[in-house]
Image (tube, rainbow, N blue to C red):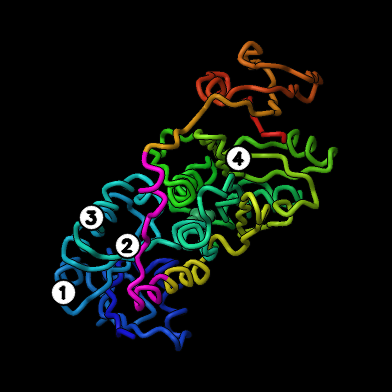
């Protein structure tokens, strides 16, 4: 086994988590050479000799084999990762935004430089979903993948549905616990789980998508009326990311969804994530684990470092096998609950409406609408309108 020399970018929540799991793991043969941070004056839990604010001390350092990129800024991360690979270093990253936005360029860089680029921690933190999709699931058999891909929003929804704290209080708690992004809009508007969905779409089906092509809608407009609707019907609310194969078309979205209490996804609470895979012969399978937090995310980074000890690389078999085969499709029906007061949704956008309810507290409809009509609707942007999928 090689003794890998690591250069780490970032020493926030995940960087510190990685440090702790590295300290406690006896089986990984690697050592931290340098850690690059933005602010050298901030007090740190490690000896000052570890730290630098000069990225070249890592990127141009012949004594470093692997760059571990754990910073927040996706564009700066892309520059670091590009330089590292061009300098012949393997890279481990947890940066879902950077990976989802630059997937094709990152694939070319790995190929050109014959290095490994691993990013298990970017999707659902501790859940080993990417390597499982790469190594285990044959795409001919895999028909869908869905689940809870964001720890912060699941934490917020779990507490909100418990009815004890307000939205602002729980969001603050998710931030304090280090689950939320520095810009929590990415979590609560469903953008972060959409990045993860884009990465998983690629490893599940070989389909390269741009994040802006996939529809996302968040949880920030959920109110007591919606929660009351759920409770009266034995439902809970989860932010679900989903992709499903329908012949050569792939349906994909990230939307809040009513889930029957007692089902597997309803029992995934707080910062836990879950991925449900459907395939022809094994049928339904579940992967479950912590989707945010320092050590759970650090453990996935550690697992990638360990894989590098064995020269592991993603083979991207599905990309070559399915070149151009699958197309993203928006022409499918979603059954939705739409709550509104004041402005109404445009009823003509719906293929069918099965229920309309009016009351002093609020109105709602239940109906079927094509994803493309939902995506293009102006009424959905109104602050007084919210929608949740009803399966
Ligand atoms: N903000 C992310 C989440 C962190 O809450 O899931 C892990 O990707």
Give the side of residue 283 with respect to residue 78, left or right: right
On residue 117, the disc is 2
Measured Cα–Cα span from mark 4 to mark 3: 36 Å
Bounds of the magenta segment:
304-323
> Circle 2 — which element?
strand
Q: Which residue is mark 4?
A: 219
Evaluate if marks 2 and 3 touch, with contact meaning CB atoms under 8 Å apart: yes
- Most extreme residue toward the bottom, as rendered? 26
Mark 4 or mark 3: which comes first in sequence? 3
> Circle 1 — which element?
loop
Measured Cα–Cα span from mark 2 to mark 3: 9 Å
The question of residue 308 being in magenta is answered with: yes
Mark 4 or mark 1: which comes first in sequence? 1
Q: Which residue is mark 3?
A: 109
Residue 178 appears at what percent x and percent y? 50, 62
Mark 2 or mark 4: which comes first in sequence? 2
On residue 96, the disc is none
Residue 216 appears at what percent x and percent y? 52, 36
Residue 31 appears at what percent x and percent y? 32, 83
Measured Cα–Cα span from mark 4 to mark 1: 44 Å
Measured Cα–Cα span from mark 2 to mark 1: 18 Å
Q: Which residue is mark 1?
A: 61
Q: Is mark 3 within 8 Å of ligand 1?
A: no
Q: Nearer the viewer, residue 166 or 292?
A: 292
The question of residue 348 being in magenta is answered with: no
Give the side of residue 54 with respect to residue 243, left or right: left
Question: Which residue is drawn at the image coordinates 54% and 24% (left, top)?
Answer: 331
Q: Is residue 296 above or below residue 274?
A: below
Question: Which residue is drawn at the image coordinates 62% and 44% (left, top)?
Answer: 239
Evaluate if marks 2 and 4 touch, with contact meaning CB atoms under 8 Å apart: no
């Amino acid at each position: 086994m090689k003794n890998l020399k690591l250069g780490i970018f970032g020493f926030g929540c995940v960087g510190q988590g990685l440090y702790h799991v590295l300290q406690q793991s006896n089986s990984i043969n690697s050592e931290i050479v340098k850690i690059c941070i933005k602010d050298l004056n901030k007090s740190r839990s490690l000896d000052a000799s570890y730290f630098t604010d000069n990225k070249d001390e890592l990127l141009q350092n012949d004594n470093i084999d692997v760059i571990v990129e754990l910073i927040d800024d996706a564009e700066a991360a892309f520059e670091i990762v590009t330089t590292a690979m061009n300098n012949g270093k393997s890279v481990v990253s947890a940066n879902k935004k950077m990976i989802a936005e630059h997937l094709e360029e990152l694939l070319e860089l790995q190929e050109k430089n014959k290095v490994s680029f691993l990013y298990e921690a970017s999707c659902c933190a501790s859940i080993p979903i990417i390597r499982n999709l790469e190594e285990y699931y044959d795409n001919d058999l895999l028909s869908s993948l869905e689940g809870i891909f964001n720890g912060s929003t699941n934490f917020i929804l779990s507490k909100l549905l418990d009815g004890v704290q307000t939205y602002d209080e729980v969001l603050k708690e998710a931030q304090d616990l280090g689950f939320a992004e520095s810009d929590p809009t990415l979590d609560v508007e469903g953008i972060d789980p959409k990045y993860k969905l884009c990465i998983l779409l690629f490893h599940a089906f070989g389909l390269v998508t741009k994040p802006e092509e996939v529809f996302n809608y968040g949880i920030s407009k959920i109110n007591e009326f919606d929660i009351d609707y759920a409770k009266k019907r034995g439902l809970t609310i989860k932010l679900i990311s989903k992709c499903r194969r329908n012949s050569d078309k792939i349906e994909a979205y990230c939307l809040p969804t009513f889930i029957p209490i007692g089902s597997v996804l309803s029992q995934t609470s707080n910062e836990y994530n879950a991925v449900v895979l459907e395939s022809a012969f094994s049928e339904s399978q579940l992967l479950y684990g912590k989707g945010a937090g320092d050590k759970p995310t650090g453990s996935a980074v550690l697992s990638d470092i360990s894989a590098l000890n064995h020269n592991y690389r993603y083979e991207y078999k599905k990309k070559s096998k399915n070149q151009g085969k699958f197309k993203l499709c928006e022409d499918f029906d979603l059954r939705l609950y739409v709550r509104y007061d004041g402005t109404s949704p445009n009823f003509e956008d719906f293929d069918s409406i099965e229920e309309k309810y009016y009351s002093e507290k609020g109105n709602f409809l239940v109906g079927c609408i094509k994803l493309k009509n939902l995506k293009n609707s102006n009424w959905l942007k109104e602050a007084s309108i919210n929608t949740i999928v009803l399966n």
